[in-house]
Image (spheres, grey):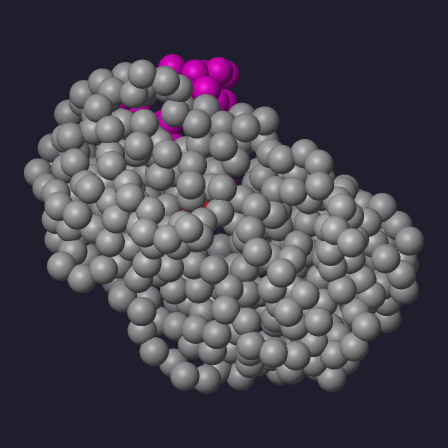
């Protein structure tokens, strides 16, 4: 959690216009570096997200003896010299996932399969997030996990080895849990199966076959994986598409600011990440899909967004996992839409980098919005504008900071967003790109 860093945002001085190329997908960047490290051979990755979260994942593998060569200064291209499934070296330091839940939870699966002990920790935010959801299944598979509060809180020490295959029926709809179990399943003695209460992002299932490892998904949603001795570096480079979770900030901003017309270039439109587009379309946003194509195993398209009268709606519970990271900025949209917006069944938002329901309720209320927290969501009545000249706290959560920068575009004066430096975890060039389409946002220490 990065504390510090103040953004000064809003109001927009005119329509937002232009094309935007947002950085690579965070979820896929984590997985690409993991699978490349565990493969035999050399993998070149392009479109990598150089956010702090993904750099933490790369560093974790460097700390276990994997050689990674950065191919450009921006750190969007890299070459990973894979060591094979059994080639990682026991780290002589504590592995640090920083702010990244995805790193620590997927690595729990990888480390469960290693014949050594290793300890993982993270920053103050990550050390508060629940790990039992991944610790329980790897314990069932045979790994020994010790940690604070019975292994629910970091730091955790994992002693791995040969694992027993399990059929894990997850209580939470979490791609991190599913991916942890599948990665551990590579090291198991039989077929590992996972069921989840609602389908979640399937990047692990799509990417493993690129490394020679098929994953079966049955019509009832059961995901099965056979164990293997080796993953193989793909003959082609792994190319990562632009992150829809980052693009969504500009989609909401363009919808909210009168006469805007912004195109988000070549972003991922995988159904399991596309909940934000379904929610925004149901709110009346003018979104147009252009130039549909594929990047590797993932569908992409340009999404053109023109400003439009957004209205409230009731979010379909089935869309919740598919838009889980976008709700902070969707709350900002709802706070400035006509009528009532209702989100339920989204208690997972309370265990992200911050409690995102209360963080957004506090920040939007401070700016005059009408938002009522519910245990598993919120009810929001939209207003024509937010108050200016207010201070809000992003609590070191990147998505709260960016969501409030978007909301501020329709404020009556500047909103000062404190503890916003964590934007660097997922979207280091957010401010520069926002400025490029005309958003009014800057760092307080910028002139
Ligand atoms: O698997 C992933 O890459 C992610 C899964 C989601 O978390 P959960 O699995 O906890 O829902 C999401 O919030 C996170 O940003 C990335
Ligand atoms: C929840 C997020 O990430 P993670 O779980 O990897 O920290 C996010 O990026 O919004």
Task: State the count of labels.
Answer: 0
Q: Position of residue 314 (x, y in %)?
A: 65, 66
Residue 388 left/right relative to 139: right
The residue nearer to you, when weighing 271 against 48, is 48
Q: Name the quarter where the N terminus is drawn.
A: top right
Q: Position of residue 418 (x, y in %)?
A: 76, 42
Residue 30 left/right relative to 261: left
Residue 160 left/right relative to 102: left
Q: Position of residue 94 (x, y in %)?
A: 39, 19
Q: Name the quarter where the C terminus is drawn.
A: bottom right
As displayed, is residue 301 above or below residue 405? below
User: Which residue, as the protein is rendered here, is positioned at the far left?
Assistant: 229
Q: Quadrant of residue 419 in the image?
A: top right
Q: Quadrant of residue 38 in the image?
A: top left
For the point 85% across and 46% down, which residue is it? Answer: 391
The residue nearer to you, when weighing 184 against 236, is 236
Asked if one can make out residue 395 in the rendered structure from this viewpoint, the answer is no
As displayed, is residue 89 above or below residue 357? above
User: Residue 152: within the magenta?
Assistant: yes
Residue 281 left/right relative to 86: right
Asked if one can make out residue 180 in the rendered structure from this viewpoint, the answer is yes
User: Residue 153: within the magenta?
Assistant: yes
For the point 79% across and 69% down, which residue is it? Answer: 12
As displayed, is residue 357 above or below residue 112? below
What's drawn in magenta, residue-wise?
134-156
For the point 33% across and 47% down, which residue is it? Answer: 70
Q: Position of residue 53 (x, y in %)?
A: 47, 41
Q: Quadrant of residue 297 in the image?
A: bottom left
For the point 65% across and 72% down, which residue is it? Answer: 437
């Amino acid at each position: 959690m990065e504390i510090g860093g103040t953004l000064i945002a809003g109001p927009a001085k005119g329509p937002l216009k232009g094309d935007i190329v947002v950085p690579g997908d965070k979820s896929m960047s984590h997985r690409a570096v993991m699978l490349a490290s565990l493969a035999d051979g050399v993998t070149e990755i392009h479109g990598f997200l150089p956010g702090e979260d993904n750099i933490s994942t790369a560093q974790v593998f460097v700390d276990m003896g994997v050689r990674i060569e950065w191919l450009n200064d921006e750190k969007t291209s890299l070459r990973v010299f894979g060591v094979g499934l059994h080639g990682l070296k026991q780290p002589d330091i504590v592995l640090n996932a920083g702010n990244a839940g995805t790193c620590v939870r997927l690595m729990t699966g990888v480390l469960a399969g290693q014949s050594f002990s290793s300890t993982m920790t993270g920053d103050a935010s990550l050390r508060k997030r629940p790990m039992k959801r991944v610790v329980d299944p790897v314990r069932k598979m045979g790994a020994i996990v010790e940690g604070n509060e019975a292994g629910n809180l970091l730091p955790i020490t994992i002693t791995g080895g040969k694992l027993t295959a399990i059929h894990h029926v997850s209580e939470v709809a979490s791609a991190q849990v599913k991916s942890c179990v599948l990665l551990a399943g590579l090291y198991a003695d039989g077929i590992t199966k996972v069921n989840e209460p609602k389908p979640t992002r399937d990047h692990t299932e799509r990417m493993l076959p690129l490394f020679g490892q098929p994953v079966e998904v049955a019509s009832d949603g059961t995901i099965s994986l056979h164990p293997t001795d080796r993953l193989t570096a793909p003959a082609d480079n792994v190319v990562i598409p632009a992150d829809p979770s980052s693009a969504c900030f500009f989609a909401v901003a363009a919808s909210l600011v009168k006469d805007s017309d912004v195109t988000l270039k070549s972003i991922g439109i995988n159904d399991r990440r596309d909940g934000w587009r379904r929610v925004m379309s149901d709110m009346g946003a003018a979104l147009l899909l252009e130039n549909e194509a594929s990047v590797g195993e993932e569908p992409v398209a340009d999404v053109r967004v023109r400003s439009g009268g957004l209205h409230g709606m009731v979010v379909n519970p089935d869309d919740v996992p598919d838009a889980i990271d976008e709700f902070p900025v969707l709350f900002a949209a709802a706070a400035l839409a006509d009528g009532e917006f209702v989100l339920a069944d989204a208690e997972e938002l309370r265990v992200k980098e911050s409690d995102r329901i209360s963080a957004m309720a506090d920040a939007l209320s401070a700016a005059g919005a009408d938002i009522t927290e519910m245990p598993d969501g919120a009810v929001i009545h939209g207003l024509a504008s937010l108050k200016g000249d207010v201070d809000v706290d992003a609590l070191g959560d990147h998505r709260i900071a960016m969501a409030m920068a978007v909301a501020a575009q329709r404020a009556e004066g500047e909103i000062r967003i404190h503890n916003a430096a964590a934007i660097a975890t997922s979207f280091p060039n957010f401010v520069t790109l926002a400025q490029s389409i005309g958003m009014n946002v800057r760092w307080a220490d910028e002139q």
